[in-house]
Image (spheres, grey):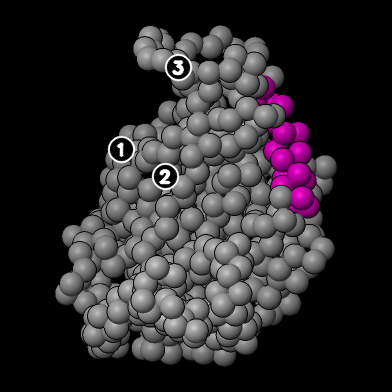
Amino acid sequence: MLYKVYEAQRTMMEPFVDFAQAAAKLYGNSMSPLGQNPLAQRVAAGYSLIYRLGKDYEKPSFDIQTVDIDGTSIAIHERVEIDKPFCELRRFKRFSDDTATLAKLKGQPAVLLVAPLSGHYATLLRDTVKTMLKDHKVYITDWKNARNVPLSDGNFHLDDYVNYVQEFIRHLQGRYGNCHVISVCQPTVPVFAAISLMASRGETTPLSMVMMGGPIDARLSATAVNDLATKKSFEWFENNVIYKVPANFPGAGRRVYPGFLQHSGFVAMNPNRHATSHYDYFQDLIKGDDDATEAHRKFYDEYNAVLDMDADYYLETIKTVFQEYKLVKGTWDVISAQGKTERVTPGDITTTAVMTVEGELDDISGAGQTQAALAMCSGVPDSQKKHLEAKGAGHYGIFSGRRWREVVYPSVKTFILEHNKSLTEEKKALPLTSAPVKPVTGAVAKVAAEPQVTTPAAPAAEAPAKVAISMAAARTATKPTAQAAVPSYTRPNGKPTPKVPRRK
């Protein structure tokens, strides 16, 4: 009911928002009769602020057209490589016609950047992507707004998230031989689980995983986010923040945690800061400070754009991560895409280097919460582990802004490069076959910087992009499907994975 009321209110406000936008332009134009008024600039600033506060914010674009590498401008082509019901695997392919630059780009590491599914769109990591493109082949998980996913596509569970990540990892392994994985905030937990399960099955795991500002062990240094999850019961969340999508969206009838409620929670965490920011925007408009006003618009265009999350995924995350701490207690069972129930055992990881990153001033994921992953990776040598605390950085500072570019990224870049050597050495020892290159015509011949190379990949068992079994079917199936595609579920130590009771 609340969702319907919100949509009705937003629809009623649209004419006033449009009027405020038009009035701001009229009073702000010196050629307009209204712009001749002595108070015109103040009136225009007021209307502009009203428009910004009332408008509906759509999903922003990444808008990364080029990146500069050693003084050479590299063209970026953004495309979707895998399209799942609730997520797209988006690739930022680099092109250059400079021979020296091309040779440099070919050998750079492939990185899967797993974006949060916690309210904002993946474009929140725009700065992360743009920075990493200088030294890496970059892919990102672009999560969809649940209100736009038809009910016919089924529900989305935390298990599905884990299975999606595994499928995307296998996709990169099939293309490049192996890859590195970076998870930011919320996805640190499901990514950790995904790689743990791959290790338990004996699959090839990524060369490294970097976990940044995530609640691996939410019991440590509890923040306001952790307190809310522990002080409220599971039933409270289910009864107070879950609503059905109204009829005017493709996902009508789907149970979701609405984006507008999440946005209200974001603002409520720092209300004074946001009020001050909007007042400063009003003052900057009056002063004519175009740089400051544009910076404000860019930030809030991103911050105010929120998406709905499927109710099952959200509630299971609350229960698994913040209330029952199943990952750290070793009690988390995940249902695979083939319908098999498996226990998450981080200690089975042996060949993946692990790095954790925390912000000194992070008020969302407290100190030690992410670093806890290092102790849980008991099978990884200490020489393959690293922790970084970014001094003076808050939650967003570890993946965006100056501290990300000057403090965090250099360490992450070095860590990935150090653990990319094994793949480089393996490629030197193996024959490479490349796809035939089609001639390119035109004024300037653009040469792909990242040719597709066929190399020995992870277990042939996985045909991930083709195995699209919905979790709804998996949960009701009487026996696992696609058995031929299931790899051996035996741990590296030779012991079979213990059977665990299937969740009902």
Q: Residue at x 36, y 64 (%)?
A: 58
Q: Position of residue 195 (x, y in %)?
A: 56, 47
Q: Is residue 422 magenta?
A: yes
Residue bearing the label numbered 1: 466
Q: Nearer the viewer, mark 1 or mark 2?
A: 2
- Toward the viewer: 383 or 438? 438
| Residue 19 visible in this rendered orientation of the protein | yes
Q: Position of residue 409 (x, y in %)?
A: 72, 47
Image check: 362 left or right of 306? right
Q: Residue at x 53, y 23 (%)?
A: 96
Image check: 362 left or right of 495? right
Give the extent of the magenta segment: 406-424
Compared to 469, does 151 lie above or below? below
Q: Residue at x 50, y 31 (%)?
A: 75
Mark found first going from the N terminus, 3 or 2:
2
Mark 1–mark 2 distance (CA, rounded to whole Å): 14 Å
- Do tag 1 and tag 2 residues touch (Cβ < 8 Å)? no
- Toward the viewer: 380 or 119? 119
Residue bearing the label numbered 2: 89
Secondary structure under tag 3 reads loop
- Toward the viewer: 244 or 473? 244
| Residue 341 visible in this rendered orientation of the protein | no
Compared to 103, does 290 lie above or below? below
Count of marks, rendered view: 3
Q: Residue at x 55, y 74 (%)?
A: 285
Compared to 243, does 130 lie above or below? above
Mark 3–mark 1 distance (CA, rounded to whole Å): 37 Å
| Labelled disc at residue 444 | 3
Amino acid type for the residue under numbered disc 1: Lys
Mark 3–mark 2 distance (CA, rounded to whole Å): 29 Å
